[in-house]
Amino acid sequence: MNQTETPPDAAPANAIEIRGLKKTYAASRKAPPKTALKGVDLTIPRGSMFGLLGPNGAGKSTLINILAGVVNKSEGEVRIWGRDIDRSPRDARAALGVVPQEIVADVFFTPREALEVQAGFYGVPGRERRSDELLAAVGLSDKADAYVRALSGGMKRRLMVAKAMVHSPPVLILDEPTAGVDVELRRQLWAYVRRLNAEGVTVVLTTHYLEEAQELCDQIAIVNRGEIVACEPTPQLLRRLDTRNVVVTPEGDLAAPPALEGFDVTARSGGAFAVTYRKGRSSVEQVISAVRAAGVTIGDITTEDPDLEDVFLALTYGDASQPDPTKD
């Protein structure tokens, strides 16, 4: 990697570059040493909406905390907006806004005061502060002068997003931002995040709501056991599995879904059942023939392609982590 840092006024090609990142936590009286990150290489393009997914304990939080300067890495190189976190830590941190998973609220401040204090921490001059603009953007204008302790959990989360943006960072990290947020507040939050992204802000998202990642992110990396097991554009990632479901609604009621040799069959609501087949080995016609041969009269039929949840489970809990190289 080029060791020359990006000039101050130039936008780098990549928002974040990580090479050979390792983190080992020292042994304690109760636990042996633990390696949380095992040589992670990751590139997050400028302007992307990037998903960082993985099961609990996979290493996502450690990676984010290293970026945020909360945890020291053991080995490797990290650049944020072209700035090496070792050689230019202040500039690297200034390029980053982080919304942590835990709600951190200054309960004795009002939302406006909380944003003013946060802007002061980053040295933003008074005339350049955007407290009221940010409160309006996250739908908290009517709560600007209320105490933070009186806000709901969803409102506090939106306030945390506003706090992360007080210094107009080009990179925003959202760590489980919609946990515990109701549907309407979630919709409002994503509308604002999409607007930020459209204005050029690179957004890095971690979430356990996989449908959110599939809908929002143009590229997704999956972390498992301290390693990146996939990092691809979302459509390409969804094509990793060569399986497909045929959902059959039978005429009349069945005591149980039929057992079909060579196919996985699972029950669905309303008496329907899904038949999973591999596209390179079987076809919809073969599934239909097998269902009819089992004595089932078909009332309706639909097909489903794999979604992100299917791919995620295969990569982190299954053994279908790589596509078959013999297939097109």
Image (tube, rainbow, N blue to C red):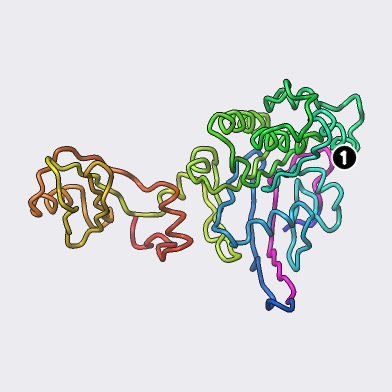
Residue visible at 56% across and 52% down in the picture: 53
Residue visible at 64% across and 48% down in the picture: 44
Q: Looking at the picture, does residue 57 appear above or below residue 82?
A: below
Q: How many marks?
A: 1
Residue 260 as seen in the image, left or right of residue 79: left
Where in the figure is residue 118, as x and y percent of width and height?
84, 37
Where in the figure is residue 177, as x and y percent of width and height?
63, 42
Q: Residues within 10 Å of mark 1 (few under 14, many from 20)?
A: few
Residue visible at 60% across and 44% down in the picture: 50
Q: Quadrant of residue 165?
A: top right
Per the image, is 159 magenta? no
Residue closer to the observer: 246 or 77 = 246
Residue 130 as seen in the image, left or right of residue 154: right
Where in the figure is residue 296, as x and y percent of width and height?
10, 48
Residue closer to the observer: 196 or 84 = 196
Residue visible at 10% across and 54% down in the picture: 294
Per the image, is 26 magenta? yes
The range drawn in magenta is 5-27
Residue reaching furthest to the front: 150
Quadrant position of the N terminus in the picture: bottom right
Residue at image mark 1: 122
Q: Amino acid at mark 1?
A: Tyr
Name the element at disc 1: loop
Residue 109 as seen in the image, left or right of residue 181: right
Q: Quadrant of residue 71?
A: bottom right
Q: Looking at the picture, does residue 251 appear above or below residue 184?
A: below
Q: Looking at the picture, does residue 70 appear above or below residue 47?
A: below
Where in the figure is residue 283, as x and y percent of width and height?
21, 51
Quadrant position of the C terminus in the picture: bottom left
Residue closer to the observer: 144 or 176 = 144
